[in-house]
Amino acid sequence: ILTDGALLKRQQLEIEELRKKLQGSHAGVLEQEVLKLRNDLLKYEMERGKLEMELEEERKSRNQWISTLHKK
């Protein structure tokens, strides 16, 4: 048989333990969200680089075409 004080102490310890677990799981969620955002950023940077290369190729092609027209 637990006294009221002992029961209260046990519940306080359990609450504190659950609070720590919750904080830890919250940190894990935040860490996963940060990793997801970093991955998204890398994808966008790669896509931007690809588009920049395509744009540069289009510019070169256009300049060659214009140069060919001027020669005629």
Image: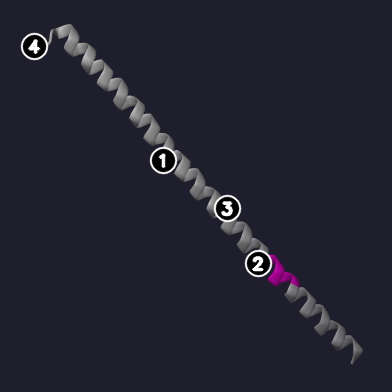
Quadrant of the frame with the N terminus: top left
Circle 4 SS class: loop
Question: What segment carries the magenta color?
Answer: 50-56
Q: How far apart are labels 2 and 1 at the CA level?
A: 32 Å
- 30 vs 6, nearest the viewer: 6
Residue 10 image point, x, y percent? 22, 16
Residue 56 disc label = none
Q: How far apart are labels 1 and 3 at the CA level?
A: 18 Å
Left or right of 57: which side holds 9? Answer: left
Q: How far apart are labels 2 and 4 at the CA level?
A: 71 Å
Left or right of 37: which side holds 17? Answer: left
The residue tagged 4 is 1
Identify the residue at horizontal 31%, vertical 20% (top origin). 16
In the rendered view, would you say 2 is above or below 40?
Answer: above
Residue 4 image point, x, y percent? 14, 8
Residue 29 image point, x, y percent? 41, 40
Closer mark to the observer between disc 4 and disc 1: 4
- 26 vs 21, nearest the viewer: 21
N-terminal-most mark, 3 or 4: 4
Residue 50 disc label = 2
Q: How far apart are labels 4 and 1 at the CA level?
A: 40 Å
N-terminal-most mark, 2 or 3: 3
N-terminal-most mark, 2 or 4: 4
Circle 3 SS class: helix
Question: In which image quadrant can residue 11 be found?
Answer: top left
| Three-letter code for the amino acid on which mark 4 is drawn | Ile
N-terminal-most mark, 2 or 1: 1
Identify the residue at horizontal 82%, vertical 82% (top origin). 64
Residue 41 disc label = 3
The residue tagged 1 is 29
